[in-house]
């Protein structure tokens, strides 16, 4: 958000509460989607860009809402991915398909990769 620190993401609740967590990088880092897990954690799709602003990479992060306290940052864990090269796309959306099965959606132009892509994955802990 404009005027706020660039290295902190803020989630605003409907009743006025806020939760904050550290961004992966201080510039060119955006939250693209958030999915609530059954255990109360948030699965965050965050996208970063290199210094040129052209190459992007998706990251999946877990925000532990139970570790959020007033005035401090929430605990965040990066989700380990078996093949990180799969996340070098313009992923824009995330949805839960089943209890531990999720789908990422890319809107990359057809000129880059042949069209949008879907990535189905299982979140294991």
Image: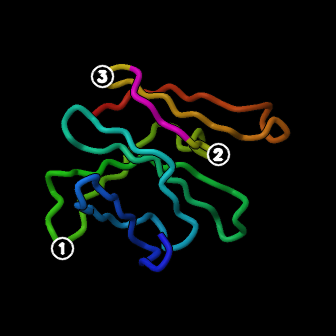
Q: Position of residue 78 (x, y in %)?
A: 37, 51
Would you name the residue on which mark 3 appears?
Answer: 99
Residue at 34 percent of width and 58 percent of height: 11
**27 lies left or right of 45:** right
- Magenta residues span 93-97
Give the image quarter of residue 116.
top right
Q: Nearer the viewer, residue 117 or 5?
A: 5
Give the image quarter of residue 99.
top left
Classify 10 Å Cα crowding around label 1: few (below 14), some (14-19), many (20 and above).
few
Q: Distance between the residues labelled 3 and 1?
A: 32 Å
First in sequence, mark 3 or 1: give its number. Answer: 1
Classify 10 Å Cα crowding around label 3: few (below 14), some (14-19), many (20 and above).
few
**Marks 2 and 1 in Cβ contact (< 8 Å):** no
Q: What element carries label 2?
A: loop
Would you name the residue on which mark 2 appears?
Answer: 90
Would you name the residue on which mark 1 appears?
Answer: 71
Whether 94 is among the magenta residues is yes
Q: In this view, does 98 lie above or below 63?
A: above
First in sequence, mark 2 or 1: give its number. Answer: 1
Q: Where is residue 94 in the image (x, y as percent from the top left)?
A: 48, 36
Q: Is residue 26 above or below residue 13?
A: below
Q: Position of residue 7 (x, y in %)?
A: 43, 73
First in sequence, mark 3 or 2: give its number. Answer: 2
Q: In this view, does 52 lie above or below 120?
A: below
Closer mark to the observer between disc 2 and disc 1: 1
Closer mark to the observer between disc 3 and disc 1: 1
Q: Is mark 3 on a helix, strand or loop?
A: loop
């Amino acid at each position: 958000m404009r005027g706020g620190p660039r290295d902190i993401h803020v989630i605003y609740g409907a009743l006025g509460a806020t939760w904050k967590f550290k961004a992966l990088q201080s510039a060119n880092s955006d939250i693209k989607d958030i999915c609530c897990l059954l255990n109360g954690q948030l699965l965050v799709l965050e996208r970063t860009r290199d210094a040129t602003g052209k190459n992007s990479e998706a990251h999946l992060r877990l925000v532990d809402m139970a570790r959020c306290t007033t005035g401090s940052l929430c605990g965040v864990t990066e989700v380990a991915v078996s093949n990180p090269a799969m996340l070098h796309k313009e992923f824009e959306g995330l949805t839960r398909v089943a209890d531990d099965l999720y789908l990422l959606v890319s809107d990359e132009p057809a000129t880059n990769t042949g069209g949008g892509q879907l990535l189905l994955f299982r979140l294991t802990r």
